[in-house]
Amino acid sequence: MGTIDDYLTGLAPADRAAIDRVYAIAREEEPDAEQGTGYGMPALVHGGRPLLSVMRAKKHIGVYPFSPDAVAAVAAALADHPGASVDKGTIRFQPEDPIPEQTLRTLVRARLAQIDGA
């Protein structure tokens, strides 16, 4: 088990499913990403740098791609999404209103491009 697996075991089923979905999509985009930490949070790590963290907060689930530019790449796609909000480096959503798959893929690809220097 790794840091993400450990984190997921302590969550309510709906939260665990919503968070695991985000990580699963990220792993499809970067199968070699490893479990680790980024800024003290459980995260997928690529090339020694944090790729993405997803955590339950009191009122939402937060997606943290460690990059305001990656968030900006999907902000317009989330503008009309129910229950979603975007901040400088964070995307917030509710388990009952998950972020669309294509939007997550775009987010992960944007972050990977940054890490890889593309």
Image: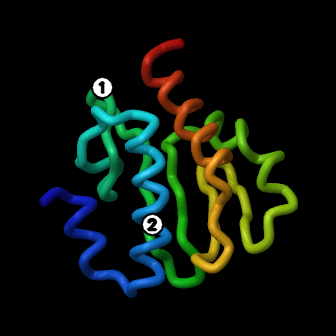
Q: Earlier in the sequence, mark 1 or mark 2?
A: 2
What residue is drawn where x is 24% and y is 41%? 34
Residue at disc 2, secondary structure = helix
Is 85 placed above or below 26 here? below
- Which residue, given by chain and number where applicable, does mark 1 sit on? 47
Q: Is residue 77 left or right of residue 4?
A: right
The amino acid pointed to by label 1 is Gly
Q: Does residue 20 appear left or right of residue 48 in this picture?
A: right
**Farthest residue, direction left:** 1
Q: Which mark is residue 19?
A: 2
Along the line of sight, which residue is nearer the eye, 75 or 15? Answer: 15
Locate residue 7 relative to residue 72 in the image: left or right: left
**Marks 2 and 1: in contact by CB < 8 Å?**
no
For label 1, the SS is: loop
Measured as percent of width and height from the top left, residue 20 is found at 40, 64
Q: Residue furthest right?
A: 80
> What residue type is disc 2 on?
Ile
